[in-house]
Amino acid sequence: MVKKESNRMTRISWIHQIRICLAGYIILYFACALCKAAPGNLFEAEAAELIGGASQTADPAASKGYSVSLGKPGQGIQFSGLPAASKLAIRYASIETGTISVAVNEQPVRKVNVHSSGAVIGSFLDAVIQIEISAGTRLTINQTADDVAVNIDYIVVGQGDLGLPPDIWNLPPLPVAEGPYSADWMAISRLYTVPAWWREAKFGAWAHWDPQSMPEQGDWYSRGMYMEGSPQYEYHLRHFGHPSEYGYKDICHNWVIDRWKPDELMALFVEMGARYFMAMGVHHDNFDCWDSTYQPWNSVRVGPKVDIVGIWEKTAREHGLRFGIGFHNSPPRTWGQFMPVRYTGDKKGARQGVPYDAMLTVRDGKGKWWEGLDPVDLYGPVHTAKEPLLSPFANQFMWRVDDAITRYHPDVIYFDEAAGNSLWDLGVHMGLDFLAPPLVANFYNKSIRWNNGRMGAVINLKCVGGHYNSFKNNPELIPIVERALVKSTEAIIEPQIMPYPFQTETTLQNWHYQTGQEYLDAKKVIRLLMENVSRNGTMLLNITQRGRGDLDPEAIRICKDIGAWLKVNGEAVYGSRPFEVCGDNTVCFTRNKGYVYAVLLEWKGGPITLKALHAGGATLG
């Protein structure tokens, strides 16, 4: 019995050893697999060479319990023997906004943008940049005289994806998609022709709707709520609280769109007579209304939790409308005018000196609804309005536009920004200037690819000549840019027949819903439409939605009245071209398929005299 028991125990022992060995092999296998699957190579700061008095700092949140402090100019950290790589991630902590410097083999290569993680201990952010590193390279991160203090936990180098989200504050310049269009106004104007669908459409519907609609207190709410003493600030205090505690991020979070019925709205826009539809992609507030790759503060992740632009796009196409996206987050507007007012606080009263919520950091979100989101991505890092086109936001803007057009293949994109560079507004240098040609060329080249080699794209930019001319420094560009796109103007109709198509945008009510504000009536809208069409223009009309997505009954009635008129008189509009004269205060002329149309603007019955057709005047031939 003893012998048998001993044999049995021996067998059990062998079985346990086999199991242990198998478990070890399994663990080793998965460990190796994870190593192979790792998107980059990690190098701890504590194992690197410290330069100029840089020191180790105990930090329980650091990967090995220590980070390296670079607290004054001349201090640095050097990593040697790195593998070949095209991308670098730096895990850092800081309480400042600014830059740190990167050198390869002791040669400075670039500055890296950093911002506050909320503390130098216990809270880290990742800066990710593109950089060419050869095998065996020495890489140095150091603080120069114009850099800020940081603590470094580790770096990761590798090819392609490092397993991290895009660092939207260190994006490279957007490359122009391959195609016939190059980033030059003259080259674009030589190739571009406005597509036939645009010349036929004449009338578009616009949903100028986003989280700023939620309070129903008019346009630019995300700026006005931070301007002490303004009507929107006072409203915000009464209904939501102080902007140090309840800021615009909370407006976005609490934006409810339970009354939004896109199919019913699109059917109404078709009944109104619209031939294209424009969705709000992003306004000056910097909140993306789509599943954005380069803006975590978007409508899929925050607030409604739906892809608003994607739903608009699908619905518009189902109703036979051409589809467009509006971008209002240009660097001058968003970086220059909207973001800086949020870094302040009240200048008087009980909350004097208390910073608004734009000064919060990712660390402050722990345990709150926005945990994991960084307020700086919505509000921007602390900065001045100087040189917005040279800011880190400029590249981000370009990539976000590209992200949206690549996802949704719009027929038209609109920019609420000047094309040139000579305008000033609210102390900010306005205009897309040198960013505009690559933006245009990229969209045109991609559109050709989507449309099997045919040009079907339209871009709207503003202030090309006219009252708000942004080409005062180079007026010779005006006719060139007019041929390269479809210029757009807010509310100001061109005074004469234009040689190239243009667009005028206007709104039924405020641009964002304003409680109690009056509407334009159908008669006024039709007059504006005809004044545009008779001068070779198109009109884009915002039908102002309420915060939760529905329309006032009055707005619905006006849309139907416009549609009833166009159902009878549409042949004077759709597909028409200007006549020899556009008309006067009482009549607008168009021509279409061999006919001349005279649309009477103030007819009260009885005989009329068409003075423009007098002997020696315009001809019907």
Image (tube, grey):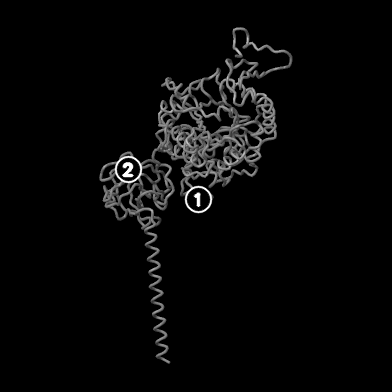
User: Which quadrant would the C terminus be assigned to in this image?
Assistant: top right
- Residue type of the residue flagged with mark 2: Ser
| 478 w.r.t. 291: above or below | above
- Residue type of the residue flagged with mark 1: Glu
Is residue 348 among the parts visible in the rendering?
no
Q: Quadrant of residue 549?
A: top right
Q: Which residue is mark 1?
A: 371
Residue lying farthest bottom?
1
Label 1 packing within 10 angstroms: few (<14), some (14-19), many (20+):
few
State left or right for residue 32 relative to residue 400: left
Percent x, y for residue 57?
Answer: 34, 53
Q: Quadrant of residue 530?
A: top right
Q: Quadrant of residue 596?
A: top right
In this view, the residue in front, 506 or 548, is 506
Circle 2: element type: strand
Circle 1: element type: loop
State left or right for residue 354 relative to residue 7: right
| 522 w.r.t. 153: above or below | above
